[in-house]
Amino acid sequence: MSPHTFPLGPPPYPLGEPLVRREGREKVTGAARYAAEHTPPGCAYGWPVAAGIPRGRVAAVDTAEALALPGVITVLTHENAPRLAAAEDPTLSVLQEDRVPHRGWYVALAVADTLETARAAAEAVRVTYETDDGADVLLRADHPRLYEPEEVNGGYPGTRERGDFEGAFAAAPVTVDATYHVPPLHNHPMEPHASTAHWSEGHLTVYDSNQGATKACEDLAALFKLDKSEITVVSEHVGGGFGSKGTPRPQVVLAVMAARHTGRPVKVSVPRREMPAVVGHRAPTIQRVRLGAGNDGVITALSHESATHTSTVTEFVEQAAVPARVMYASPNSRTVHRVVPLDVPTPSWMRAPGECPGMYALESAMDELAVQLGIDPIELRMRNEPDTEPDSDRAFSSRHLMGCLRDGAERFGWSPRDPRPGVRREGDLLLGTGVAASTYPVLIVGSDAEAHADRDGTFRIRVNATDIGTGARTVLAQIAAGALMAPEDRVRIEIGNSDLPPAMLAGGSAGTGSWGWVVHKACTALRARLRDHVGPLPADGFTVAADTRQENSERSPYARHSFGATFAEVQVDTVTGEIRVRRLTGVFATGRILNPRTARSQFIGGMTMGLGMALTEGSEMDPEFGGFAGCDLAGYHVPACADAPRIEAYWVEEEDPHLNPMGSKGIGEIGIVGTAAAVTNAVWHATGVRLRDIPLTPDKVL
Ligand code: MOS
């Protein structure tokens, strides 16, 4: 049997139960401590100095005034900061040279006894720059330096072609050729990036806000030329990341540098306003989608081309055309990425990188095609369901997109829908409904875990998972209890510490599948051992270690993806141009749902983020001064409670034996994927005007 195939019996209790978060009470009472809330004795505070030019170099740093402030310990610059080994991720190579690749790049760190003094000292540092002329910060579809990269984020090939797109498109009786703009977007997790670094007797302990302490520990070891055993990274509670904490960010390097330089524990938090420049962002995309179809709605030609930016520091290519390789059958297809390095902060992962902006464009174009053909958008998708994954011709391990669309249509009350736009009025308001599909790949990464049985009948599971707010502890306890056939309250879960067995980070919607599989494996082995054992346990109990590297060393023979459908109802104010979403309904096919309470929270959280993407979120590079213009939560509008109406998430039953022992697919990202297009398609239905440049702020509507 393939290592990717599992006989799925009924889920062992308490899998599938809506257990409450284990740390919920700690969190809501303020007892849970986050990275910046650890204050070792003698702790000092670092405040970074961000470059104030669009591009150039640091000519001189005058620290005299800063150092003269009472309580200032040091100011680190590229001249006196500890030297680092060459970084695998060059955004971590801070204070190593005088180059300023973009506005906001860190050029110094003030360290003082208090946070307030550190901040005052940072403001008193006088940096003289040599500014390069002609910083280039704006992405254009015709930018002369755009090139086609070999590979895009996720390791996908940059370009794929099947058949003869141009010929088929030219011959198609019905065509859509539309270009969509997605602006830079910011992750803005509730908890800003923060680190507290502490050297004690040759051992470095770092409290760090990240999505994976294993990776943070490895990267710090490489940068500071230490052995991993000399470092412990603790990430016990993390207030969100959405990809921006997938890898270490500059503040952790600065904190460790400063602690090494001063001999004191040092805490560094990234100020909210500086986050857009140093923790990654979703790169803007300009996406041209061309669809050619017969009068029956069957697509014969599909092209998705995405242009995006990266920084001059490192190449990161948002893989926006990748979902077009998964979604719809078309004998002739081409998907192309182009990228241009600009003088911008380095982009990175943001919730459903690739799928999220890519599906906004593709699902908008599908809606445009449905309108052209006069076919209901759900029916159009049904007519283009592929038998196998179009890109690879592999069989899908499971694909219940149609089930999601049908179920969602019923719950939402899609039919009978008058397809005509701009005909439903309530006073000054125009009303409309829209739908879009979503998809996200199933990713699983081999990990390590230990399961321990104590004499007192309790169990301890050790795995370096991270709970970034998802409920990872709770669902891992459910998986462990199910495999052990033990009561859930007898299972303790230890996560969020790099001393634990190394495991996948909380990213790519891969956490539960990766950690859960190895926890299941360790617990199953432990249970077998206990079953065979006669008499009392030895004093230190039994410990079983497991890893799933072998199982995950080869690619699954199946194309494995989650699917979903999102429905939106909007109202457009014809006087003010304000759009409000009245309700959102999402239905997802993501294998087995292991905890309906925490799963629902992931789905509606993703959908809320998609609502923001459609209507209010967006950032702009300042062409004159460089840097993002709207850096804080006053200038970058994430949805507040009043913006988030009736958001409902459901799922269809999906039994997929080709995933992992739990039969689960990832659920952290798919909620965002179809939401923006569902909302903007509804805006078309309300108004009859196709707006292809999100967010749909009132100025664009009027
Ligand atoms: Mo998610 S953007 O893979 O952390």
Image (cartoon, grey):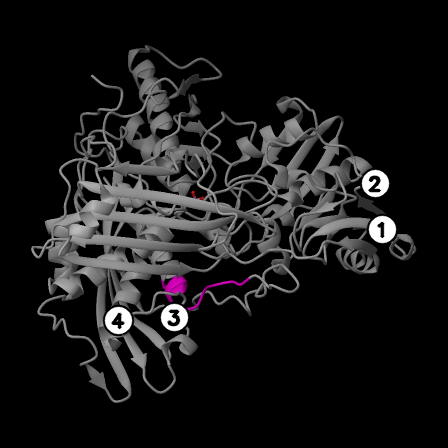
Mark carried by residue 696: 3
What residue range appears in magenta? 611-620
Name the residue carrying label 2. 79
Q: Pick whichever of labels 1 and 4 is earlier in the sequence.
A: 1
> In the image, 604: left or right of 349?
left
Location of residue 151 in the rendering, given as x and y in whole percent from the top left corner: 43, 35
Q: Is mark 4 within 8 Å of ligand 1?
A: no
Q: In the displayed orientation, state which residue is furthest to the bottom.
A: 427
- Residue 21 seen in the current view: yes
> Dot 3: within a 10 Å radius of its alpha carbon, few (fewer than 14), some, or many (20 or more) residues?
many
Whether 131 is drawn above or below 483: the answer is below
**Ligand 1: image quarter:** top left
Q: Amino acid at mark 1?
A: Val
Q: Amino acid at mark 4?
A: Trp
Whether 618 is drawn above or below 341: the answer is below
At mark 1, the secondary structure is strand
Dot in front, 2 or 4: 4
Whether 550 is drawn above or below 354: the answer is above
Inter-mark Cα distance, 2 to 4: 56 Å
Q: Pick whichever of labels 1 and 2 is earlier in the sequence.
A: 1
Q: Pick whichever of labels 2 and 4 is earlier in the sequence.
A: 2
Mark carried by residue 61: 1
Location of residue 448 in the rendering, given as x and y in whole percent from the top left corner: 44, 23
